[in-house]
Image (cartoon, rainbow, N blue to C red):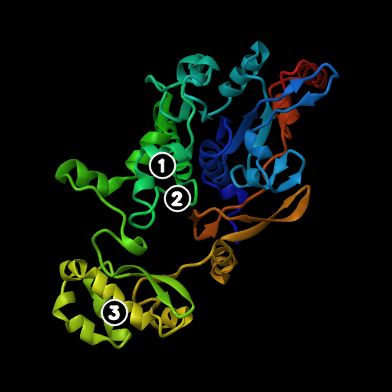
Amino acid sequence: MTLPADQLPLKGFRIISAEQYGAGPYGTMFLAQMGAEVIKIEPPGKIGEDGKRRGGGDTARVVGPHFLRPGESTYFQGFNLNKRSLTLDLNSDEGQKILRKLAATSHAVANNMRGDLPARLGLDYASLKDVNSAIVCAHLSAYGRDNERANWPGYDYLMQAEAGYCTITGEPGGDPQRMGLSMVDFITGTIFCIGLLGALVDAQRTGKGRDVDTDLLSAAIHQTSYPALWYMNHGEETQRTPRSAHPTATPSQMFKAADGWMFVMCQLPKFWDILTTRMGRVDLKDDPRFASNADRLANREELTRLLDEEFVKQSMAHWQDLLAGHVPVAPVYTLADALDNPWLETIGMRTQIEHPDNPELNVLASPIRFDSQRLPNRAAPLLGEDSDAILGDLGYDEAAIADLRTSGVI
């Protein structure tokens, strides 16, 4: 069951987004799923001497290995559901004219360009306030727009490296490792979305827009959270722990059952009591070596050995049945197992949409629900799919649109 389109919370809001690849599109997809009209501006490509257009579009459209048609990747669908696509050369005078006309009828302009580009391409508040004083201009860059790194390109993996993630991920003594997913992109896109919405609320209240910024490195550093405070205030540097264990709570780590791994988390003292009782090992609860969390932490290696001996006697299914709902526990799934988990169907996190090249394209639902209902999804747009309609709304007739296409503006 999905929320009807006329009940979506951002219905009626128009957001222009000059975006590409991952972080920015991930954030604006939340806005599009909540009902905003998100117009994705993409470069139109170049017209060669033979009159044929080459290249163009968000670079994510050509990220392989899986494609719905040449130049339209499945990867692209993961970041651009529910959006519209307008091809537009922002480096051209006519492209700038169209951008300003569009901004005059929009509530926000978003971009995830390199920090030195938004001002040059007319995407900041200073450039657009004269056509729309209430416009919100949201910027997501690698390192920010107001420092000596503004013109540096940057990506998620670089931020994981510089923010310290790679040295606290993995087993002790191993080589530095990044996370298996581009989590810096995803969290920065989410923060980007939060900042844009905050500025939008204020603009609706005051009639005055503004710039709002975030950047990959700042977001990555902010996610170091409580370990950052431990280091800055107490000089304690969080280290890797065996089996991805929590740095202070124990037992809170991976354990191996007879047929695979699982994660058990006794974050609170009561869970330790429940665990030992339900597994029939109250002797461990009464053991003075494990009486308190501090005791268990001091003797974690021995406690791990004893629990291993118990957990390996039974299957993961046995332990899930015994502990689930009583002690925080989860199987350590492969990605395939995780996505084939029937629970995703139960809660509606897997869904199908129609795409011109696949009428039953599988996608993930938005994790946000309103009135207990999931948000509707539709396929990401083909490159330039909405250019004619958007320009028509701005007053361009068919002949003018054809001229813009011939000249390479769209």
- Residue with the mark numbered 3: 306
Question: Hey, what amino acid is under mark 1?
Answer: Gln
- Callout 3: SS: helix
Of pointers 2 and 3, the one earlier in the residue sequence: 2
- In the rendered image, the vertical position of residue 333 relative to residue 123, given as above or below: below
Q: Please give the label number shown on residue 160.
A: 1
Q: Nearer the viewer, mark 3 or mark 1?
A: 3
- Callout 1: SS: helix
- Residue with the mark numbered 2: 179
User: In what quadrant of the picture does the N terminus appear?
Assistant: bottom right
Task: Determine the residue positioned at 74% across, 20% down.
Answer: 396
Q: Which of marks 2 and 3 is in front?
A: 3
Of pointers 1 and 2, the one earlier in the residue sequence: 1
From mark 1 to mark 2, how far is it between C-alphas?
8 Å
Crowd band around label 3 with a 10 angstrom C-alpha radius: few (<14), some (14–19), many (20+): few
- In the rendered image, the vertical position of residue 53 relative to residue 308, given as above or below: above
The count of marks equals 3
Task: Determine the residue positioned at 44% across, 43% down.
Answer: 184
User: In what quadrant of the picture does the C terminus appear?
Assistant: top right
Question: Hey, what amino acid is under mark 2?
Answer: Met
- Toward which corner of the image does residue 381 lie, by quadrant? top right
- Labels 2 & 3 near each other (Cβ < 8 A): no
Left or right of 98 on screen, residue 108: left
- Labels 1 & 2 near each other (Cβ < 8 A): yes
Left or right of 75 on screen, residue 155: left
